[in-house]
Amino acid sequence: MKLALFLGCVIPTEQYAYEVSVREVFPKLGIELIDIKGASCCGCPLRGINALGWAYLSARDLALAEKMNLDVLTLCNSCHLSFFEIKNLFDEKPEVKDKINLLLEKEGLRYDGNVKVKHVLDVLHDDVGVDKIAKAVKRPLKGLNFAAHYGCHALMPSGTGRIDDSCNPHKLEALIEALGAQSEDYLERLDCCGGLAATAAEKMVAKMAWSKLKAVQDHGFDGMTTLCPFCTKMFDAKQEVIKKVVGDETVSLPVLYYVQLLGLAMGIKEEKLGLDLNLSPVDRLFEKLEGANGK
Amino acid sequence: MATGLESVKPKFLDELRSIFGGQQPNYCYQCAKCTSGCPVAKFSEDFRPHQIVNKTLLKLEQQLIPQEVIWICAACHKCIERCPQKVSPYEVIEALRNMASAKGFVPAGYLTMAKSIIKTGLIQPIRRCRRPRAAEGKIVFYDRNTLNLPPLPMPEKLEIFASNLQQIGFGEKPKKGV
Amino acid sequence: MKEELRIGVYVCHCGLNIAASVDCKAVAEYASKLPDVVVAKDYAYMCSEPGQNMIKEDIKNEKLNRVVVASCSPRMHEPTFRTAVQEAGLNPYLFEMANIRELCSWPHEKEPEKATEKAKELVRMAVAKARLIEPLEPRTVGIKPSALIIGGGVAGIWASLKLASSGFHVYLIEREPTIGGHMAQLDKTFPTLDCSACILTPMMVDVSRHPNITLLAYSELKEVEGYVGNFKVKVLRKPRYVDENKCIGCGTCATKCPVKVPNEFELGLGTRKAIYVSFPQSVPLKYTIDRDHCLYFQKGVCRLCERFCEAKAVDFTQEPKEVELEVGTIIVATGYDMYDATKAKEYGYGRYKNVVTALEFERITNAAGPFHGKIARPSNGKKPKRVSFILCVGSRDERADGIDYCCRFGCTAAIKQAYILKNKFGEDVDVDICYIDIRTFGKGQEEFYRKVRNMGVNFIHGKPSEIRELPDGSLVFDVFDTAANTLLNIKADIVVLMTGVVPSKGAKELAEILKVPLSSDGFFMEAHPKLHPVETVTEGIFVAGTAQGSKDITDTVSHAGNAAAVAGTLMSQGEVKIEPITALVDGDLCRGCGKCEEVCEFNAIRVEEVQPFTWTRVLNAKVNEALCRGCGVCAVACPTGAITMKHFTDKQVMAMIKAAT
C-alpha cells in the first residue's frame, strides 16, 4: 500500500515522536509513505481568522496529493476532519470551490476532490487489519491496561466520514487488544483534551486536560494511548505544566501514541519509536514490560 | 439596565451567513443540548454555546464581537453532532470569529500563526524540545534536524502562495473597531 | 345547429385576498370584451349567498349557458359554484373556474400590475375552455351499508361501536392476536388517571359481543378493489393453530408449554409461552401458537398443549385462510409505533439496561405489568432512588435519524409518569423532567401539570447531550438548566426516554393496497388538515386516530367518532354520485394494444373484445367509469391518441394553451 504522507504543522515542528514512530512502523506493515512536497498547514487552527483562507489551505494540500495520484494519510485528527469538511462544503457551495481553484491555478494546482483521505486509525484497523497486527506482535503487552483516547475529531461530527462511531467507538480498543493488552471502558473515554482552545484560554484548557488525566489515573490504567498531536501535546508534553497550573502534583501518567505502543509490541527499540522523547513517564511502561516478559 | 434590541436590520445576520460555513442560527429553539454536552462549558462559567447562538439571533453584537468568550470554543464539534435543529453552534462561533478578526478583535497568538503560514506554510517554526530523562544533571535539547528527519515541507511557489493568502485577507490586523 | 354561446364571467375580490394585488374591475372589463361573453362582473365574495344569487339570476335573466368564475382554487369552491349553477337549471359541468388566487394574487403579491395581466390571461384561458365544455351526468351507484375497519386499537374499536350502533355492519380486522392496541399497554392515563385497560376492556368486550360487528383478529388486509360504496376486499386470516370455535381461553395449554420467549406486549420485559394470549383481557380470548418458537413446528416434538387441551382446540394442521368481503366504506385505524430509541445513540438505549422508553416504563409501573406494579430498575429489580425523564427523544429532530414533528402527548405522559412515581414514593424518589418545551394544551392538562409541579418534581429546561453508564448500571449525564443558568450533573437509577411516534409498521404497504397517499411524515394523509381530518382523497376511504397523525387518547376518540360519523352519513344516503370526469375511448382510434391497462393504477380500463359490426370482432379498451379516477395517465400512454378525458379533452386543453400564448 502506498500513501501520500501529510504531516500537518505540529508534528514536523514539535511532536516529532509521532513522525519518528510512523516512519519506523508503517513500512514494516507494508505501507510505503511518500511525503507530499510543498505541503502546508491544513488551515484548521486559523478557521476563525479567515474561513476562506482555511479553505484555500486545505484544498491546496488535497490538490498536491491529487497531483501525486495517491490517497492521503493524515496523522492528525484535525487535519483529517478539515479535509472532509472542505469536501462537504465544496459539494454544497461549488461557487467557493471555483473561487479557490482560481487561486490554485496560479500555483499550477487544481482541486477536484478525487483523493481519498485516511487516518492512522482506519489504515491500521480497516486496511491492515487487527489480525495482521496481532501476527506482527513479538512482545505482547500482557498485563497492561491502556485508556483509549480517540480525540474528538476522529469521531465527530458523524456525516463527515468520521473514523468510528461517535457514541460507542471500538476500533482503538480493538487495536490495543491486538497487542495483547487490555483497554477497558471508562466514563471519561470520550472527553475532550481542550487543545484547540489553548491559544485563547490556557488555564481553562489545563483544567480540562488535567481532569481527564486524573480520571484515567484513578481508574488504574497503566497509560493513555492517543491518535492526535494536539491531544498528545496536552496530555504528554504539557503534563508537567498542567500539574502546576492546577496545583496537583499527584498526576503522573504515561501517555504515548498508539503507533509507539504498536512499535513496542512489535519488538522495535524505544529510541526508534521516539519513546525517548515523550515527556510523560513512559519509562514506567518499559519497566512493567520487562517485568512481565522477563527480559 | 435593560439592553435595547436593534430593529430588524438584517445586516448582522446577513454578514454572519455570508461567511463560508454551515451556520443556521435561526432554527435554534434553545434546548441547550449543545451546552449540556460542551466540554468547555463544563470548565468555564462564561462559555455557553446556546447563549451565543441566542445573542446572535438577537443581534447583540457588542456582547459577542469584541468579547473573549467567542475564542474559547475548543472546536470539538459535539454541538454539531447533537443539535436537533442543525444550528451548528460551532460554525456560528467560527463565523463570529471571522467577523471579529475583520474588525481587529483577535487573540495575538492567531495572528502570529497566520504570519508564520504566509512565510513558511506552517503555523510555527521548528521547536527545540528538552530531552526528558537525560543523564543526571544534563540538559539536552533536540529538534527535527538533530533527529535526522527529512527537511520540513514548504510550499514550492512560496511568493504565489503568500500572495494568494494576502489576497484573501489572511493575517492582516485591521484597526480595532473598524 | 350550434347553440349561441352566452358566457357569464364573474371575478371575485375574495375580500382583499385577490383584490389586494389584482385589479378585479379591470379583469372584469377585459373579460366583457372577449367573444361570446355577455356578462362580466366583479364582486367581493362570489361564494357568498348574494354572490351565488347573482350568478343564478344572470343565468335566468341573461339566458347564460356557460359560467366562468375567476376566484380561488377549484378545490375550495368548485362544488359550491357547480351547485349554484345547477340550482339555476344549468348542467353543473357547464361551469369553469379560473384560479386567480392561489395561482395569481397570492404568489405575485408584490407585483400587482403583472398579477392583473396574468389574471386576465387566466380568465381568457378559462373562457376558451368554457366555449368547448359539454354537459355531463354524474353516475349514481349504491352504497353497501357495511364498513371495513382496519386496526383494533382504541380508534378502530370506537369507530366500530359507533357504526355498529347506527345499524351498519362492521368488519373489524386486527393483525395481532387481540384487539386493544397500544392503549391496552398503558398504565394510568392523564389527566383523569383512569386505568387505561379498565376503560378500554369493556369496549373491547362490547366489540366482541355486538351483533353488528364481525371481529377478525390475527388477520391482515391483502387486496382491495372497487370504489366507494362497493369495495371488494381480501383478508388473510392467519392460522393460530387453535380452533377459535373450540378454544375457551382456559389457559391450561400455556401452563404446560415448556417454551418461554420475550413477550412483545411487555416489550421484552416479561415472557410468554409459545402458546399464548398477549394479556389476560385479550379479545378474543383465544390462544395462539407462535410457530417460530413452538417446539413442534421447529423440531417436531412436544405437543403438550394438544394433549392437555380439554376442548381439543389445538390444531397443528391449520392453514391460512382467505376471506372475501364486500363493504361500502373503509376506515384505516392502524395506529402508531414508538420511534426506535436505538437511533438516539447518545442516550445508550439498548446498551444501558436502565435506559427505557416511555412505553416500557408504562409496563414497569403497571400493576398488571412484568414487575406486578413494583416500580423497579430493570438491571437489579430494586426500587429506583432517582428517575430522570428526557423529553423529545427523536422528536423535533432534523438530523438524519430524527423525526421532525411533535408527538403531542410526550409532555403529558411524562408528567403523568412523574405523578405516579411521586404518588407512590413521595420524597423517597427524586424525579427530573428534562424538557425543551412543556406542551400541556388539552382540557385538564394544565391543571395536571400544575399539580405535579407542586409535588417536588424537578422541571429542568434543558436537554442532556449524552448519557454514560457507571459499572453498577446507574446512569450519569450533564444537563444545562437554562432557567437556573447552571450546568447540572445528574446520577439516575432509571432514565426514561419520551420517544417520538412513527406510523405503524406496514403503513406504506397498506397505503399502496388502498391507493391512498401518505403525508411526508409517513402517516395517512387527510383530505384537509382543518376541515377534512378524517377523509382521504379517495371517496369512501377514511382514516381514524393516530394512523393520520400522532395524538392522545382524547383526540383519537374524537377523531374516530368523526370518521364513524362521516362514513355513517355516506352509507346512510344509500347511494352516491360519482364524478363523471373519466376517461373516454374513441373506439375507432383504439387498436387494443393494452398500454392503458398497463399504466392504470385503478384497474379501471381493460382491453376487451367488442363487436362494432356484426361481421367483425376487435380488441378495444373499455373504461369502468366507477373505478376511473380521471387521472389521465392512460390518455398520456395511449400511442394513437384514442383516449381523452371528459371535461379535459385534448381540444379543450389545446384551446386553453392557445388562449394563453
Image (cartoon, coloured by chain):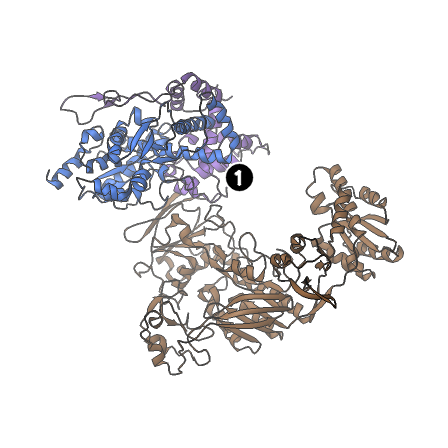
Tell me, by letter, which chain the rendering colours purple: B
* Residue A61 percent coordinates (x, y): 40, 27
- In the picture shown, does residue C584 fall above or below B141? below
Q: To which chain does the residue with label 1 belong?
A: B
Element type at marker 1? helix
- Quarter of the view holding residue C482: top left
The quadrant the N terminus of chain C occupies is: bottom right
At x 34%, y 69%, the residue is C298
- Quarter of the view holding residue A6: top left
Tell me, by letter, which chain the rendering colours brown: C
- Quarter of the view holding residue B154: top left
Residue identifier under label 1? B26
Q: Is residue C485 visible?
A: no
Dot 1, how many residues are within 10 Å of its Cα: few (below 14), some (14-19), or many (20+)? some
* Residue C578 percent coordinates (x, y): 70, 64
| Chain A shade | blue
* Residue A183 percent coordinates (x, y): 25, 44
Q: Could you tell me the amino acid type at mark 1?
A: Asn
Which residue occupies the foreground of this view, C41 or A132?
Answer: A132
Residue found at the far top of this picture: B159
Residue found at the far bottom of this picture: C310
Horizontal placement of C327 versus C18: left or right? left
* Residue A87 percent coordinates (x, y): 45, 34
Which residue occupies the foreground of this view, C531 or C609?
Answer: C609
